[in-house]
Amino acid sequence: MKKPMEIMFITTSGETRTINGDWTLAKLQGLIGGYVEKIDLPDRRVALIDEEGRIKGLALNKVASGIVGQPLVGPVVIGPKSILR
């Protein structure tokens, strides 16, 4: 069993919430709505997005884009790099 980890979940409407849980790839895919694309952040965290978000026409996520420093679409999960192990 994986150790519970805290993540930040950011919706396209700007709602941000912290969620603590036992994260599996399937649970993370459920949050973002598709296949996971990982973006490494300089502070030892990762941003997880739907790799097909642009193709699906998902809305710009302004809050997450500001945190990551590049335009991101759809819901975004930010958490420790170890979340995908």
Image (spheres, rainbow, N blue to C red):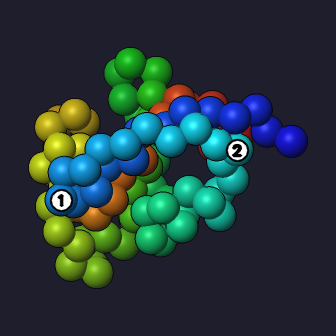
| Residue 3 image point, x, y percent | 76, 32
Q: Amino acid at mark 1?
A: Ser
Which residue in the protein does label 1 denote? 13
Q: In this orientation, which residue lies closer to the viewer: 85 or 23?
A: 23
Instruction: Classify mark 2: helix, strand or loop.
Output: loop
Picture quadrant where residue 22 is located? top right
Q: Residue at x 13, y 49 (%)?
A: 62
Q: Quadrant of the C terminus?
A: top right
Judge whether residue 57 can be spotted in this image.
yes
- Please give left or right for residue 68 compared with residue 18 in the image: left
Q: Residue at x 54, y 67 (%)?
A: 30
- Please give left or right for residue 51 compared with residue 23 in the image: left
| Residue 33 image point, x, y percent | 45, 71
Picture quadrant where residue 28 is located? bottom right
**Badge number at residue 58:** none
**Looking at this rendering, what residue extends furthest in the right direction?**
1
Q: Residue at x 39, y 56 (%)?
A: 49
Judge whether residue 72 can be spotted in this image.
no
Q: Residues within 10 Å of mark 1 (few under 14, many from 20)?
A: few
Instruction: Classify mark 1: helix, strand or loop.
Output: loop
| Residue 81 image point, x, y percent | 55, 31
Q: Amino acid at mark 2?
A: Asp
Q: In this orientation, which residue lies closer to the viewer: 45 or 10?
A: 10
Q: Quadrant of the N terminus?
A: top right
Evaluate if marks 1 and 2 touch, with contact meaning CB atoms under 8 Å apart: no
Picture quadrant where residue 74 is located? bottom left
**Badge number at residue 22:** 2
Mark positioned earlier in the residue sequence (1 or 2)? 1
Q: Residue at x 45, y 28 (%)?
A: 45
